[in-house]
Image (cartoon, rainbow, N blue to C red):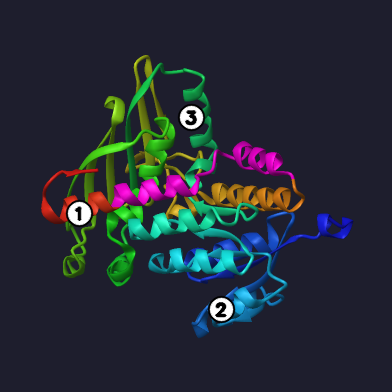
């Protein structure tokens, strides 16, 4: 490889410029060394108008195929509707691009399996699915402590994803393409639980839910609060809670129970270390959204992806693996497949009211 190729930044094209896509685009444009935001893609006028103001240097496309045809784009960053992920990943691989894709890999297990098989045809290309909690410093520290035996043998994870209530009904409008609360929210907790427990195979799940505020979800068979239990091989367990109706902000936390102790991650959600003492008592403010809670994790995740791609491009596969591992034990395509498999089973259990065996 020529020397100028080694120093050239990774040229990234972001597809999807919604609330999360815009955050990713800004990170890649201004905060990720070794990366350059070369292009953006969206069919929506408002998104492209935002891009002209915020990241004017990036080329603009309305059609994803045009983005893939751009020879000056090395990698695509997909923040598109979940139902499009699988086909867009495969198309990008055949176009010679590296791929970062937000979770989930797909809303359909068969489609996930297809992506895993197709990706094996392109071993030189990096494919990463955005399970950013693995890159959060607190989760990463907990993972390291578990590997060191700090709480003995871990056998139970309790994890939750609880979003600030949106009275404007965003989740109702999003419901037709979200895959339901367990594939939209709990898929993160599923991945974290498997990761922290040593990647066991799920054997049976049960889920239940309620509509506390957003009755429009009933039309789509969805709920705004859901609970679930997942049994794994070897007697390991996970308990999940997902909510879209929190009054105080984004409340994401996990707990791991082992034979010699327990680890808690994020049990007291807070935006900083300030405590307010007044007539209402003593309190701290909470992070309002998931992006505020995991802002640093999203950034480290992007840095790890760029480092892994550049190492592959330089022909240093071992370095690529080390780059991903050192940044937070990123999820594999197989991990993303299992998260979708379990999430789909939870959705089916919610629908039928029966336990589902995997």
Q: Quadrant of the C terminus?
A: top left
Distance between mark 3 and mark 2 Cα atoms: 41 Å
86 drawn magenta: no
Give whichever of 224, 182 is nearer the camera. Answer: 182
Picture quarter containing residue 114? bottom left
Residue 348 image label: 1
Q: Which class describes the residues within 10 Å of circle 2: few (<14), some (14-19), or many (20+)? A: some
Q: Position of residue 48 (x, y in %)?
A: 57, 81
- Point out the stretch of residues depicted in magenta: 316-343
Residue at position x 34%, y 39% from top?
159
Find residue 356 and report its image quarter: top left
Lower position in the chain sequence, tag 1 or tag 3: 3
> Is 351 in front, or is 246?
351
Residue at x 29%, y 30% (from the top left corner):
233
Name the residue tied to disc 2.
Answer: 65
Left/right of residue 32 with respect to residue 235 in the rendered view: right
Above or below, 149 against 106 in this view is above
Q: Mark 1 touching mark 2, by CB under 8 A?
A: no
Chief secondary structure of the magenta portion: helix
């Amino acid at each position: 490889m020529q020397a100028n190729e080694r120093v050239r930044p990774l040229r990234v094209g972001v597809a999807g410029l919604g609330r999360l896509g815009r955050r990713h685009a800004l990170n890649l444009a201004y905060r990720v060394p070794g990366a350059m935001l070369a292009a953006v893609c969206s069919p929506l006028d408002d998104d492209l108008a935002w891009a002209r103001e915020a990241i004017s240097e990036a080329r603009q496309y309305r059609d994803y195929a045009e983005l893939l045809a751009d020879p000056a784009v090395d990698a695509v960053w997909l923040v598109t509707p979940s139902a499009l992920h699988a086909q867009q990943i495969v198309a990008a691989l055949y176009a010679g691009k590296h791929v970062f894709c937000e979770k989930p890999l797909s809303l359909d297990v068969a489609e996930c399996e297809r992506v895993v098989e197709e990706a094996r045809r392109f071993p030189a290309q990096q494919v990463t699915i955005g399970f950013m909690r693995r890159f959060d410093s607190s989760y990463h520290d907990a993972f390291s402590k578990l590997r060191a035996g700090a709480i003995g043998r871990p056998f139970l994870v309790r994890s939750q994803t609880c979003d600030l209530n949106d009275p404007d009904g965003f989740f109702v409008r999003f419901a037709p393409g979200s895959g339901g609360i367990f594939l939209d929210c709990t898929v993160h907790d599923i991945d974290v639980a498997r990761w922290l427990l040593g990647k066991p195979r799920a054997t049976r799940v049960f889920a239940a839910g309620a509509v506390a505020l957003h009755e429009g979800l009933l039309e789509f068979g969805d709920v705004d609060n859901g609970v679930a239990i997942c049994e794994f091989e070897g007697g390991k367990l996970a308990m999940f809670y997902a909510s879209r109706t929190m009054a105080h902000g984004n409340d994401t936390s996990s707990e791991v129970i082992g034979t010699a102790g327990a680890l808690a991650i994020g049990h007291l959600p807070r935006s900083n270390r300030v405590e307010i003492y007044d007539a209402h008592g003593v309190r701290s403010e909470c992070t309002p959204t998931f992006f505020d809670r995991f802002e640093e994790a999203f950034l480290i995740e992007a840095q790890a992806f760029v480092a892994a791609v550049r190492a592959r491009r330089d022909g240093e596969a071992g370095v690529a693996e080390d780059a991903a591992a050192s940044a937070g034990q990123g999820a594999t395509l197989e991990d993303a497949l299992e998260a979708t498999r379990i999430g789909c089973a939870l959705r089916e259990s919610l629908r039928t009211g029966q336990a589902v065996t995997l």
